[in-house]
Structures are given as C-alpha cells and as structure tokens.
Amino acid sequence: MAIFSNLEDNIVVERQKQKIKPPPMYQVVLLNDDFTPMGFVVMILQKYFRKDQKASIQIMLKVHCEGKAICGVYTRDVAMTKVKQVTTHAKQAGHPLRCVMERT
C-alpha cells in the first residue's frame, strides 16, 4: 500500500479575521415648543423611553430651558421607531411636539 502526497491537492485555507464594526448609533432628541404641556412630555419620556419620574422631569426641564434634550441613544431602526411613536402620539393628542434623531 503506497501513500502519495501531491502538493497540488493540499489546500491551505487561511482564516482571515474580520473586523466587525458596531452599528452607528443615533440620539433621539426632543425639541422644545411653546404649546406642548410639560406633563405630556414627562409621560412621553416614561412611556417610550422607560425613564423614571425623576429622570423624565429632568429631561423635560432641559428641553424647556435649553431647547432640546437627548432622550436616548439607539441603533438606527430603534431610533426611527421611537421618533415615529413619539411624533404619532403627540399628533394624535393635538400637540406639536417634535422628536428627531441625530447620528452620534
């Protein structure tokens, strides 16, 4: 019994390390207006961003005093969903509250 070795049949596969980048992140930002009640903004922060009472009030006051505030940082799809949820809820409630996303 003979064993033959043929160099052409020997295949060496070298595994290349793939560098996987984390997905880009987006900030969801509430913008101030002169008409949306502060209580409504607090409710939005609690309902859609899972903020507690204290954090919701702090963010709401930042929106009121500085013109805008970050509600959270998410992947693109999650950020888009949150913006749509907030905008839809505000519109249905008759408030002009604006919510946007900005790439970090």
Image (spheres, grey):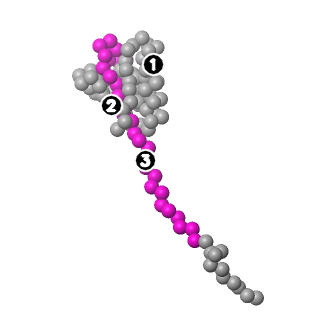
Q: Mark 2 points at which residue?
A: 70
Q: Is residue 47 left or right of residue 8?
A: left
N-term-proximal mark, 1 vs 3: 3
Classify mark 2: helix, strand or loop.
strand
Residue furthest out toward the bottom: 1
Q: Mark 1 points at which residue?
A: 89
- Crowding at dot 3, Cα within 10 Å, few <14 / some 14-19 / many 20+, comes out as few
Gap in angstroms between the C-alphas marked 1 and 3: 31 Å
Residue 29 location in percent, x, y?
Answer: 35, 28
Gap in angstroms between the C-alphas marked 3 and 2: 21 Å
Which secondary structure class fits the magenta region best? Answer: loop
Query: Over which residues does the magenta segment extend?
Result: 12-40
Residue type, numbered disc 1: His
Please state the total of marks drawn on the protein image. Answer: 3
Which of label 3 and label 2 is nearer to you? Answer: 3
Residue 51 location in percent, x, y?
Answer: 37, 30
Say if the magenta span includes residue 11: no
Residue type, numbered disc 3: Pro
Q: In this view, does 48 lie to the left or right of 38?
A: right
Classify mark 3: helix, strand or loop.
loop
The C terminus lies in which quarter of the figure? top left
Q: Which mark, residue 22?
A: 3
